[in-house]
Amino acid sequence: MAGNWMRSSTWLTGLAAMLVLQGALAAIDIFEFSSEELRERYQQLIVDLRCPKCQNQNLAGSDSPIAADLRREIHRMLEDGLSDAQIKQFLVDRYGQFVLYEPPMSGNTLLVWVLPLVFAGLGGAALALVLWRARHQAVAQGNLDGDDEF
Amino acid sequence: MKRIVLFIPLILFVLLAGFFYAALEMRKTRSVEELQSALIGKPFPAFAGLGLANEPVDLDTLVNGEVTLVNVWGSWCPSCVYEHPYLKQLVERGVRLVGVNYKDTPEEARAWLNRFGDIYAFHIQDPLGSLGIDLGVYGAPETYLIDAEGVIRFKRVGVVDERVWTTQMEPVYRQYGGQLDAE
């Protein structure tokens, strides 16, 4: 039993390490930041933005030249004092909305945000109805027979 | 009446399946390479720099009242060699072609042009790719079609060949008043 527990905890540690190390797969650039806050925002931005050339990678994970250029540009804009929203807008203006991994809630992307909620709502309502009916029926039957033995 | 309610999930499923199938079909005809540029309908970004003869070039040099193709190329780019003969044909038929020498050195660019032929009206040096970022360039080659006022009307990611030109670019070129000499 203890062995089993040990094994699964080792496994979990491995999994956790993999998840943590995923961030370490980032391409390596050397940038000087004037403050720790800028560095953190940079790290977040390059994870949130998609590489235009290699669309299944974010800017952090891509070695393509355009991703390197965009990281350099983001570094420059951060040092110039632009906000995260301004930097994202800069890239959207040039590369389109698909550079954002998380599409904004507007226009034709609204469906993507709203439909899951609608379906979850419908499903939840249906489930509640079925459960309520089942209980209602059981109670009704119980009252009729007055017998809960099977 | 109650029966109909039972069919709602099935109807929803069929609707969703149809929706996803249509999306898949669209994906086939519109490859990822052909993502529409965010700059279509917007003016060519302002720039000021040097040409390959070290002459000053800027937006006014580029926008001269003619429909123009702006070709992003580099001497390091094999597909640029591949599309060069077809671009040459277009230039011979009267198309104005301007080069953005993307992430290249002037020496290597000039050597490349000496070898394959300089068919461009002029070039814009973009050694660091900063004009490229303003244009939303992914890589070379890419070709932009700008109208007489310098508004971007079409973007081609990848090589321009006869098929791309006749099916996609020539109609836009003519729509904005571009002229072609007979072959």
Image (tube, rainbow, N blue to C red):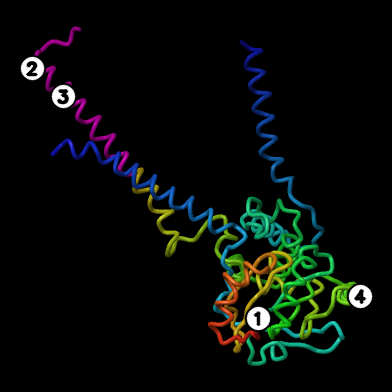
Judged left or right of residue B8, residue A31 is right
Per the image, the residue denoted by label 1 is B45
Crowding around mark 4 (Cα neighbors within 10 Å: few <14, some 14 to 19, many 20+) is few
Q: Are marks 2 and 3 in contact (CB under 8 Å)?
A: no
Residue B176 falls inside the magenta stretch: no
Amino acid tagged 4: Glu
Q: For marks 4 and 1, give the CA distance.
A: 26 Å
What's the chain of the residue with tag 3?
A
Amino acid tagged 1: Pro
Judged left or right of residue B14, residue A72 is right
Amino acid tagged 3: Gln
Quadrant for the N terminus of chain A in the image: top right
What's the chain of the residue with tag 4?
B
Per the image, the residue denoted by label 3 is A137
Q: For marks 2 and 3, give the CA distance.
A: 10 Å
Per the image, the residue denoted by label 4 is B107
- Which residue ends up furthest to the left in the rendered image? A144
Question: Foreground residue, B162 or A52?
Answer: B162
Magenta stretch in the rendered image: A121-150
